[in-house]
Image (cartoon, helix red, strand yellow):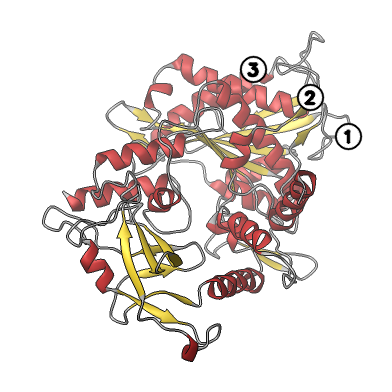
């Protein structure tokens, strides 16, 4: 297959899987309705306030409601320099004893001023003290596709600005409610609503797009939030993102902060971090004639989606993809490795992994080669092999380390080890071994694994990180076993480290 054909097919698969938007931002977008005189009406919503202080970093004395308000004020002040825009704030400070401002009040305010968009400004929180970076939430709505597309483009403008400040970019994201917020549409269709009311209720009740900006983490990014000047810079960055998206010009007629040229976003860092970039997530229903490479590309694209986005995928279609891949693997290995009936091990036949090994603790070293081999056996698949013609007497299994050296029966098995099933010199089957949390492949669960995982999560195309991880090591990064590698895995790894200690 020539390179041009391969590139085209790859593009087609990505389009079919995720309908990923062509991230192009024109000089002056008409997206989101403007007023009849062309004025853009923007409502800035400083999240929380009053008795609701939001996320708190007690060590550094950082209260999210105060941070959000200072950022919003700076953004408001900066936008006053531009023509063609009216800016409102849902509040300019709420006394602690006066309660707080409800989400419904914030949404209704946006309607009262006939807003074109509601932008809710926040700082993030996590149980992990090292979680850091910027992310923006947009609507998932499949019914109002333009809300997702346009909001995503605006969100990317925010992330571009934050990246220029040196922030870790966590991407454009969506989050579905648990069913408490539903969208009942005029055409009779129903879909699960957005989790955040400032996104979901503005759409459901008033048809106004909303986005929620998480600038930084109050703990993991404390050094970026601990002075008035740093907060002002976030506010100016917010304003610059809005200016960039709407193509605004200053009142003196000078160019906008980001220049007047058309901007085409090809930033792989942002694109890769954006777990959902379009609400239309579909898979081709007829995959019967797709070759293995196509099917694996579809599977990989699906697995990169957030859990929220996966709920929008035709599950019959994705099941068909997995079934065909499993069938392909079964045909490749009619005589293959499987587990004995009472084993707790799990074999991922499609990706070629052995999982479920005992996690080493202070009192348990994990599993050695002999213990692991005792849980594995040879399996002859009668669907693809004639049992009478297959002899397993001369078939053997053994385990090697990551460098290919055979393990003695008493040696500990670690991430990156490989179990082989051979007949003479012929390899009939092989599986990579994954020990959950053993990211560095040394067979222990400790702080060095956390260091490697942090490096992997913060890696970008421009700065790929100091550690080069194998397939098995990347799989070991999925500590919480949800199918993705994210900041949540750091939290799960910390729990494992505590347990192992």
Q: CA distance from mark 1 to mark 2?
A: 17 Å
Residue tagged 1 = 36
Secondary structure of residue under mark 3: helix
Q: Residue at x 75, y 59 (%)?
A: 143
Residue 377 in percent (x, y) is at 34, 77
Closer to us: mark 1 or mark 2? 2
Residue tagged 2 = 247
Badge 1 or badge 3: first in the primary sequence: 1
Q: Residue at x 65, y 59 (%)?
A: 293
Residue 313 in percent (x, y) is at 64, 64
Badge 3 or badge 2: first in the primary sequence: 3
Q: Residue at x 55, y 47 (%)?
A: 103
Q: Is residue 31 left or right of residue 72?
A: right
Q: Is residue 325 left or right of residue 100?
A: right
Q: CA distance from mark 3 to mark 2?
A: 15 Å
**How crowded is the residue under tag 3: few (<14 C-alpha within 10 Å), some, or many (20+)?**
some
Residue tagged 3 = 78
User: Is residue 49 among the parts visible in the rendering?
Assistant: no
């Amino acid at each position: 297959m020539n390179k041009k054909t391969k590139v085209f097919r790859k593009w087609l698969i990505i389009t079919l899987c995720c309908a990923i938007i062509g991230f192009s931002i024109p000089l002056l977008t008409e997206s989101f309705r403007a007023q009849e005189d062309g004025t853009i009406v923007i409502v800035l919503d400083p999240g929380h306030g009053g008795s609701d202080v939001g996320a708190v970093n007690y060590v550094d004395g950082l209260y999210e409601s105060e941070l959000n308000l200072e950022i919003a004020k700076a953004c408001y002040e900066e936008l006053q320099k531009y023509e063609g825009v009216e800016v409102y704030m849902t509040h300019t400070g709420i006394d602690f004893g006066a309660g707080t401002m409800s989400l419904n009040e914030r949404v209704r305010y946006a309607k009262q001023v006939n807003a074109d968009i509601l932008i809710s400004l926040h700082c993030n929180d996590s149980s992990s003290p090292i979680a850091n970076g910027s992310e923006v939430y947009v609507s998932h709505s499949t019914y109002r596709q333009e809300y997702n597309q346009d909001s995503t483009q605006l969100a990317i403008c925010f992330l571009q600005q934050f990246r220029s400040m040196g922030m870790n970019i966590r991407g454009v994201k969506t989050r579905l409610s648990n069913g408490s917020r539903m969208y009942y549409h005029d055409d009779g269709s129903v879909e699960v609503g957005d989790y955040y009311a400032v996104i979901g209720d503005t759409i459901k009740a008033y048809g106004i797009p909303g986005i929620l900006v998480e600038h930084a983490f109050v703990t993991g990014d404390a050094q970026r939030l601990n002075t008035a000047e740093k907060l002002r810079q976030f506010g100016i960055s917010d304003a610059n993102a809005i200016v960039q998206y709407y193509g605004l010009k200053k009142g003196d007629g000078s160019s906008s902060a980001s220049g007047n040229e058309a901007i085409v976003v090809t930033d792989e860092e942002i694109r890769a971090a954006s777990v959902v970039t379009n609400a239309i997530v579909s898979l081709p229903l007829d995959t019967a004639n797709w070759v293995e490479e196509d099917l694996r590309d579809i599977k990989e694209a699906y697995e990169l989606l957030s859990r929220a986005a996966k709920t929008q995928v035709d599950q019959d279609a994705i099941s068909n993809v997995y079934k065909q891949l499993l069938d392909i693997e079964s045909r490749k290995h009619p005589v293959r490795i499987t587990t004995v009936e009472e084993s707790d091990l799990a074999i991922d036949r499609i990706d070629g992994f052995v999982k479920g090994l005992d996690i080493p603790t202070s009192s348990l070293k994990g599993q050695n080669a002999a213990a692991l081999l005792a849980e594995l056996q040879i399996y002859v698949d009668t669907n693809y092999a004639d049992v009478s013609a297959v002899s397993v007497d001369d078939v053997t299994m053994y385990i090697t380390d990551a460098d290919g050296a055979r393990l003695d029966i008493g040696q500990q098995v670690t991430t990156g080890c490989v179990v082989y099933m051979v007949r003479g010199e012929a390899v009939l089957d092989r599986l990579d071994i994954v020990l959950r949390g053993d990211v560095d492949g040394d067979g222990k669960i400790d702080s060095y694994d956390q260091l490697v995982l942090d490096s992997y999560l913060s890696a970008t195309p421009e700065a790929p990180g100091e550690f080069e991880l194998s397939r098995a090591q990347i799989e070991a990064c999925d500590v919480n076993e949800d199918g993705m590698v994210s900041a949540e895995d750091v939290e799960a790894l910390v729990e494992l480290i505590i347990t192992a200690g």
